[in-house]
Image: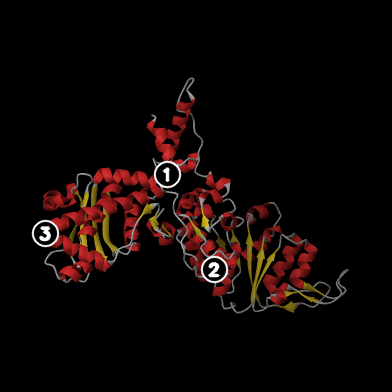
């Protein structure tokens, strides 16, 4: 998972008397009230001791947030996890975090990060009750990032604020380094971060988080309708593979050149054809889609070209064909690889002469259309077998676009899922429909043989099964819920006891999930508390 995939509405749950962040109960406090608390601390125990208390408070909060992100998600790498911490911190409204630079050498253990805090609420609190300061005062923020990164990287990292809005600066700046990189420079500040019971508290909190991972409640939020058409421009595109296809589509759209779109079933070939049509000068004209593989040849010819009354039994009156209906617009010929050689020849004439001949007529009619074709078959292989005309292939593939399979653009699974959730919320009239964050890993690990069409159907099924609009892993099909499970060979030999076999299996699941106990518990079908109890027997 990447930091940019985090969404506040999928992390926070609201219910009367409870506000929770992925199972960790949190509270809201007034900015002015906390400012007064800061002043009372300064007046009571001195500025120096206040800095110590607030720095340690931030340190604990940062480690707690890190535990949430580590326990509930599988991150691409440590850098994405740290970026996610900045995004979560910004979502919490404490400040808007901007990473100016970030360097991390895991092998050498070296870490260096420069960060800016825009609109720091802590600096604002200080100015409100104590006025301008000669020194930086964002102690909670410094403690927060020190605690967060230290837990993520499993080594001591400290952030020191170098300039602050409370000093009259525009924004607050801080530098974070591992303890070895800081060297003697960090010694005057170490005391602010130390707390005798911080590790014990973090351990207890982490245990509580794991026990409450399933407590995320439904949220209340109006979902803005994104429209009914599945436009690529409506969906965030993250994958390079699909972005490259869109670049080519954007280039070919303004021209009348014939386009051949290839790709697996359900990958979104018709969506791409509509996208090209909307960007073309023919966008105000009709877009006519025809599934060439769904009709027998006689009906397909009449459907495309039209017919004259009396041309065949049942032709009681003249009928206009879809090529004529699409005048000044675009005809999309789906499953073009399924048509007969005779029909191939007739379509070739349309592309060459821009004219059609109705069934039962002898005089051709001119048509002003653009043709976009699509297939999930290998046309070159069909050509080699004499099943498809080579000259038609070259006429169709003036520009060829291959829509990548969903398994080859996994970065787009989450934004596509959110798009379908938003659209289904309106279609099914479920106001609070949302995808629970615990589903993300399952959706991204599945291979999606049916591609985008399968994903849309899966989300609709899950939405219908969700009792309160909250889509959970148990609402997904078994094939997806079990996507992360792998075959295991027993660790124990000979004639093990049932308890030994069970423990060996649990250890292998933990190994396969990278030690993530929350995810391992989901694979095993037990809650995290039960998993901890079984491990303690070891």
Disc 1 on helix, strand or loop? Answer: helix
| Quadrant (top left/top right/bottom left/bottom right) for the C terminus | top left
Crowding near the residue tagged with mark 2, few <14, some 14–19, many ≥20 C-alpha atoms within 10 Å: some
Residue appearing at x 13%, y 64% in the figure: 135
Q: Quadrant of residue 54?
A: bottom left
Of the image marks 2 and 3, the number of the one nearer the N terminus: 3
Q: Quadrant of residue 200?
A: top left
Whole-percent x, y for residue 53 in the image: 19, 55
Q: Indicate which label's residue lies in the foreground, 1 or 3.
A: 3
Lateral position of residue 312 relative to residue 91, left or right: right
Lateral position of residue 210 relative to residue 318, left or right: left
Lateral position of residue 301 relative to residue 351, left or right: right
Whole-percent x, y for residue 380 in the image: 63, 55
Q: Mark 3 points at which residue?
A: 46
Of the image marks 1 and 3, the number of the one nearer the N terminus: 3
Crowding near the residue tagged with mark 1, few <14, some 14–19, many ≥20 C-alpha atoms within 10 Å: many
Q: Name the residue under label 2.
A: 231
Disc 3 on helix, strand or loop? Answer: loop
Q: Mark 1 points at which residue?
A: 518
Q: Indicate which label's residue lies in the foreground, 2 or 3.
A: 3
């Amino acid at each position: 998972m990447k930091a940019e995939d985090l969404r506040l509405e999928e992390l926070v749950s609201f219910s009367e008397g409870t506000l929770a962040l992925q199972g960790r109960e949190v509270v809201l406090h007034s900015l002015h009230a906390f400012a007064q608390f800061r002043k009372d601390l300064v007046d009571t125990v001195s500025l120096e001791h206040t800095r110590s208390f607030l720095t340690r408070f931030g340190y604990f909060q940062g480690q707690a947030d890190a535990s949430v992100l580590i326990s509930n998600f599988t991150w691409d790498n440590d850098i994405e996890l740290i970026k996610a911490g900045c995004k979560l911190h910004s979502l919490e409204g404490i400040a808007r975090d901007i990473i100016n630079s970030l360097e991390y050498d895991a092998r050498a253990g070296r870490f260096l990060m420069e960060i800016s805090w825009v609109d720091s609420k802590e600096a604002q609190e200080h100015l409100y009750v104590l006025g301008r300061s000669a020194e930086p005062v964002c102690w909670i923020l410094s403690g927060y990032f020190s605690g967060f990164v230290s837990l993520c990287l499993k080594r001591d990292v400290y952030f020191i604020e170098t300039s602050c809005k409370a000093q009259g600066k525009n924004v607050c700046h801080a530098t974070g380094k591992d303890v070895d990189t800081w060297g003697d420079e960090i010694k005057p500040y170490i005391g602010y971060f130390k707390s005798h019971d911080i590790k014990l508290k973090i351990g207890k909190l982490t245990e509580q988080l794991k026990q409450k991972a399933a407590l995320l409640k439904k949220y209340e939020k109006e979902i803005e309708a994104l429209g009914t058409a599945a436009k690529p421009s409506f969906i965030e595109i993250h994958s390079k593979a699909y972005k490259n296809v869109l670049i080519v589509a954007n280039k070919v759209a303004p021209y009348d050149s014939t386009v051949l779109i290839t790709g697996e079933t359900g990958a979104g070939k018709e969506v791409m054809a509509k996208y090209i049509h909307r960007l073309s000068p023919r966008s105000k004209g009709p877009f006519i889609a025809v599934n060439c593989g769904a009709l027998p040849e006689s009906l397909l010819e009449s459907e495309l070209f039209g017919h004259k009354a009396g041309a065949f039994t049942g032709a009681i009156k003249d009928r206009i064909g879809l090529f004529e209906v699409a005048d000044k617009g675009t005809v999309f010929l789906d499953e073009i690889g399924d048509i007969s050689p005779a029909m191939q020849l007739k379509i070739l004439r349309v592309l060459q002469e821009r004219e059609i001949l109705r069934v039962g007529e002898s005089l051709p009619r001119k048509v002003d259309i653009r043709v976009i074709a699509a297939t999930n078959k290998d046309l070159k292989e069909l050509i080699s077998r004499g099943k498809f005309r080579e000259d038609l292939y070259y006429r169709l593939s003036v520009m060829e676009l291959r829509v990548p399979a969903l398994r080859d653009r996994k970065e787009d699974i989450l934004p596509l899922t959110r798009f379908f959730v938003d659209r289904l919320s309106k279609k099914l009239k479920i106001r609070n429909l949302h995808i629970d964050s615990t589903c993300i890993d399952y959706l991204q690990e599945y291979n999606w043989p049916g591609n985008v069409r399968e994903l849309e159907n899966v989300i609709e099924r899950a939405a219908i099964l969700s009792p309160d609009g909250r889509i959970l892993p148990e609402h997904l099909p078994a094939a997806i819920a079990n996507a992360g499970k792998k075959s295991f060979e027993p660790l124990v030999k000979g004639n093990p006891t049932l308890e030994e076999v069970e423990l060996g299996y649990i250890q292998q699941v933990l190994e396969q999930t990278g030690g993530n106990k929350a995810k391992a518990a989901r694979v095993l079908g037990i809650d995290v508390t039960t998993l901890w109890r079984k491990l303690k027997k070891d």
